[in-house]
Image: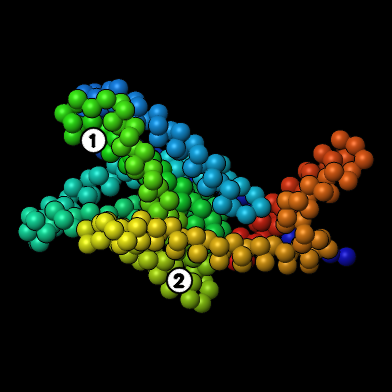
Amino acid sequence: MTTHPGPAPTARPRGAVLLAVAVIAAVGTALLARTFARSVIVFPSQTLTAIAVCAVFAAIGWWLLRRLNPLVPADRRSAAACLAWGLLPATGFAVLANGGLTSIWSRVLGLETGSAWRDALSAPVNEELLKIAGVLLLALALAPRVRGPLDGFVLGAFAGFGFQVTENVIYGIQSAEATGGTGTTTTVVTFLYERFLTALSSHWAMSALAGTGLGYLIARRAQRWAVVRGVALIALAMALHLFFDSPLIATGPGGTLRALLAFVVAMAVYLSLRHRFRRAAADHLRAHGHDPGLLRRRTRRKARRAQPDRAARRRTGEQQRHLLTETAEYAHRTT
């Protein structure tokens, strides 16, 4: 007779932490609003165009990123919280931090060198830490939502993607400002299209790597080498961000490498995590008398179709969803 593990602990909101997170988020959002309120008022049509175009981009990204989680899509509440953090508070704090760091680099390195390197020296530190701060705050407020490195990867990707969307809106508005307001909404759309071409290797990929490191630090800190892996992955995300913003190889083959490197590294880490997750899931199913083939969508669909009527197919589908949820919970906590 096989025994099934008890239900996984559910995420319980922690009132004091939630209040603190809400205050922090409100401050960051207010900073963002204060910084760009004038531009929004002066260029309303270009702003609305940028928001509309980026909203479509955000909807596509939401659908894709939720499916990075094997077996069961990422929890909507957790994903939405991290996306919202990247969209508003993280961006607001980053704008403030970037302005302060830019002044420092100009004084230390001189105006010319400081201007050339300000993005590469500022963004990797403050932006990466600010984006994954949303994942950390989520872990504190809704424990145990970050169950391991794969959760960190997915939630970090959401935070980075939200940051990426708002950054594109800001750049779209600034493209209107650069033309003195003479540019049409077409100018904004064209500019955003060029931004979307580099979307594969942008903030979401770097934050996914940093989030993976945070996942190790939160959920695996008692394991040997987990802290080293966690810190190394966060440092890797920062290094890739520095490389992405570096003025040294902006064009030619080097520019192409710069545009793709973060995506390639992020996907290599993801595929490794996914392989370990599915192996743990298969072991769990096998240990409890189930066919590991149920990990494949085709096998589950075939099992439902084999049922004699619609009611039986519905029951089979519900049983499969319950089993996959339980299996995914186990795999998240053991890989």
Q: Is residue 132 in view?
A: no
In the foreground, 144 or 275: 275
Q: Is tag 1's residue or tag 2's residue first in the polypeptide sequence?
A: 1
Q: Nearer the viewer, mark 1 or mark 2?
A: 1
Name the outermost residue toward the right. Answer: 308
Q: Quadrant of the C terminus?
A: bottom right
Alpha-carbon span between mark 1 and mark 2: 39 Å
Q: In which quarter of the image is residue 18?
A: top left
Give coordinates of residue 153: x percent, y percent.
49, 57
Residue 70 appears left or right of 137: right
Q: Is residue 194 in view?
A: yes
Q: Do the residues labelled 1 and 2 touch (CB within 8 Å)?
A: no
The label on residue 174 is: 1
Give SS at disc 1. Answer: helix
The label on residue 228 is: none
Residue 285 appears left or right of 55: right
Give SS at disc 2. Answer: helix
Q: Tell me the residue at 43%/51% (across/down).
A: 200
Give coordinates of residue 77: x percent, y percent.
54, 41
Label 2: which residue?
229
Give coordinates of residue 160: x percent, y percent.
40, 49
